[in-house]
Amino acid sequence: MFGLDLEQLAFVLLATIAVAALAYFFVFDSIEQQKKSDDRLKSVKLAATDGLTKSTARDKQAEATRRRKSVQDTLNDIDQRQKLRDKNIKSPPLKMLLQQAGMKVTVKRFYIYSGVVGLVLVLLRTFFGAPLYLAPGFFLIGALGLPRAFVYFRRRRRVAAFLHEFPNSIDVIVRAIRSGLPLNDGIRLIAQEAQEPVRTEFRRIVDMQQVGVSIPEAAMRMSEYMPCPEASFFGIVIQIQSQAGGNLSEALGNLSRVLRDRKKMKAKVQALSMEAKASAYIIGALPFVVAGLVYLSSPQYIMVLFTTDMGKMIMVCSGIWMSIGIAVMRKMINFKF
C-alpha cells in the first residue's frame, strides 16, 4: 500500500512536471512573440517619428530657403529699381525736377520765364555799360543758369523740410499700427494731418492706391518725387515687409530711430565743419571787401579795372579763377548723407 502510494505520487509529480514544462514552453514562446512584436512596433514607431522629424526639418529648411530666395529676389528687384531712381535723382528731367521742387509750373511756362530772365540780364548789361560781346553770355546765364539754380534751391529746401517732419510721421504710423489700425489708415492719417511737404507725398500714395497701385509700389515711388535716401528707406521697408512678412511696427520704429540718428550725425558734422565754412566765406568775401575799401580810399586807382580793356580782361580771368577756387572749397566742406 505504501509502495503504491509512492508510485502514484511519483506519477503525479512527473505528470505535473510535464504539464508545467509544456505550459512553460507555450507561454514562453508567446511571451517571446509578444516581446518581438513590441520591439518591432517600437522600432516602427521610432522610424515613423524619425521620419516625421526629418520631414518637418526638411519642410522648415525648404520654407526658410524659399523665404530667403523670396527676400533675395525682392532685394534684387528693389536694387534695380533703385538704380533707375538714383539716375533720375542725379539728372532728372525738367518736369520731374519741377515736381521735386514742389513748383506748379509747366515746362513750357518755365522756358518762357527763363527767356524773360535772360532778356532782363541782357538789358542790365546794357544799363551797366558792359561790352556787347558779353550779351550772349548774360543771356545764357539768365536763361539756363539762374532759373535752374532757383529750382535746385527750392528742391533742397523742400527736401530739408521733408526730412524735418518725416520721422515724426513715421512715429504716428507706428502708433497707429500698434493700436490696431491697418497701414493704409495710418498713411491716410498722415496725408490729412501732417505738415507740408510730408502731407503731399503721403497724399500721393493714397491717390495711387485709389487707382489700383499697391501700397509697397506707391511707397517705392516716393523717392521719385522726394529725392533723398530716407524716402527710399521707407519704400524698401514697406516692400520687404509685404514680401517676407514680419513686425511692421517694429521695422518702422527702427527706421524712425535710424532717421533721427542720421539727422543728429548730420548736425554734428555740420557743426564740426563750421570752422572750415567760415574760413571759406572769409576767403571768398575778401577780394570784394578789399576792392570796396580801395574804391572808398582811391577810386581812380581801382577804376582802371573797369574802364580799360586790359582791366576788364583781368577782371574776367580773376572771376573765373575765383569761381574755380570757390567751387573747390565748397566741394571740400560740403558733406552729403
Image: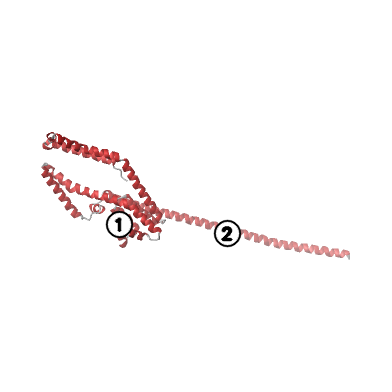
Q: Residue at x 23, y 38 (%)?
A: 284
Callout 2: few (<14), some (14-19), or many (20+) C-alpha neighbours within 10 Å?
few
The image quarter containing residue 269 is top left
Report crowding for label 1: few under 14, some 14 to 19, many 20 or more residues within 10 A (C-alpha).
Answer: many
Disc assigned to residue 45: 2
In front here: 300 or 147? Answer: 300
Amino acid at the residue labelled 1: Arg
Q: Position of residue 308 (x, y in %)?
A: 11, 36
Residue 199 shows which numbered tag? Answer: 1
Cα–Cα span, label 1 and label 2: 63 Å
Mark in front: 1 vs 2: 1
Q: Position of residue 200 (x, y in %)?
A: 28, 57
Left or right of residue 35, residue 271 in this image: left
Q: Give the total of numbered labels.
A: 2
Is residue 19 depicted above or below 304 in this figure? below
- The image position of residue 175, as x and y in percent, is 38, 57
Badge 1 marks a residue whose secondary structure is: helix
Color style of the picture: secondary structure
**Mark sitting earlier along the chain (1/2):** 2
Question: Can you give x and y, in whole percent of width and height, for residue 43 in the image?
Answer: 59, 57
Secondary structure state at the residue bearing disc 2: helix
